[in-house]
Image (spheres, grey):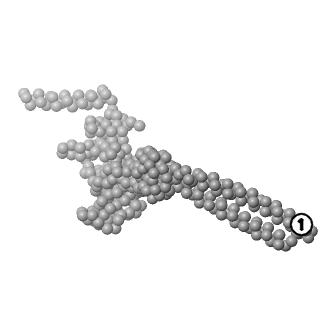
Amino acid sequence: MKHRLHKIAILSTLIFSSQGWSQFGPALVKVESAEIRSMAPVRVVAAFSKAKYITNIKAESSGRVVDLAFVGDVIKQGETLGTIADDEYALRYTELQNAIASEQANLDYLKSEAQRLSKMSQQNLTSQSALDKNDSDLKASQANLAQAKARLAQLQNEIDKLTPKAPYDAFVTEHYAQPGQFIHEGDDFLKIMSKSYTEIVAHLPIKYKHMIKKGAVWQYQGNDDQIYQATVLGFVPAATNNSRQIEVRLTDNSDQLIPGEPIKLWVPTTEKRDVLAVPRDALVLRKDDIFIYAIKDDKAVKISIKPGIAVGDYIEVIGQLDVGSLIVVRGNERLMDGQDVQILP
């Protein structure tokens, strides 16, 4: 009697499931295609980002600090990082401007005098010595004016040094001086880090050196669990630390890292090969089986697979699956073999 009731219960469940599929309509799923991808097994290593340039900006002239950029400020290349005041420069600047104006007036006079003497010479109304003296005075005045302008240009260069400029796009990380403080030429002013050039630094076992190829694109996982790409710049050709690892540097292609941020770098351990791959979300993991659902004639078809290489959001699958097959990536956890499906856009 118990066995009979058990069979009835199982039959009722199957009938209910069949009726349930019809009653509630086809299962709503999202799909992607199985495709051939070039992949290689990877090793996950800890890495971190680093500013490509870190610079201590030094005072190029002595004076009193008037202003300086705040820590954290982003400064564009060529923009001012701060101001150093020197009142003596202002006095010297005025003095040289006046000297130039005076010498220019003298030069103008000597030029007009040269024209007058030239006309008088044509009428034999002046001596050759007067002409020679005017010519000498004219050349001396031209030289004096050129010297005064050169001294002003030198002074302007010194004045420009009172306002240090950012050598590249950067942000301020530390102050070495404060407003009101007198600093001397060569003293540290502030520290900056490059903003637009962020590198990734990782240390790898030396056995993987053959996989480090300049220009190769590797992937890394950020702290937001998203996958990003970085381009290999090269490595230091020496195992210099105690663990005998080599230092590898990459350029961050995402421009979303800040210096010092830890990441997980995926390092290929062998050459890439072409494999049949599907998104990781397609896999349904059970205690005794790993399978995916393919779509055939608007029905779910369960296919047991063996997982292989996993890189990023994709994983190699080995099983009875064809390239281009539509694979369920959403809605597969409650799906059943043979169930009707409706593909969502």
Left or right: residue 155 compared with residue 107: left
User: Residue extending furthest right?
Assistant: 123
**Residue 292 image point, x, y percent:** 28, 44
**Residue indicated by mark 1:** 120
Considering the numbered disc 1 on the image, is that residue within a helix, a strand or a loop? helix
Left or right: residue 137 compared with residue 43: right
**Residue 181 image point, x, y percent:** 44, 49
**Residue 16 image point, x, y percent:** 23, 28
Left or right: residue 107 compared with residue 338: right
Instruction: Report the residue at 71% width, 57% height from top.
Output: 102
Q: Callout 1: 10 Å neighbours few (<14), some, many (20+)?
A: some
Pick the residue in front: 245 or 88: 88
**Residue 183 image point, x, y percent:** 45, 53
Q: Image quarter for residue 37?
A: bottom left
Instruction: Report the residue at 74% width, 67% height from top.
Output: 139
As drawn, 206 above or below 163? below
Q: What amino acid is found at the position of numbered circle 1 in the picture? A: Met
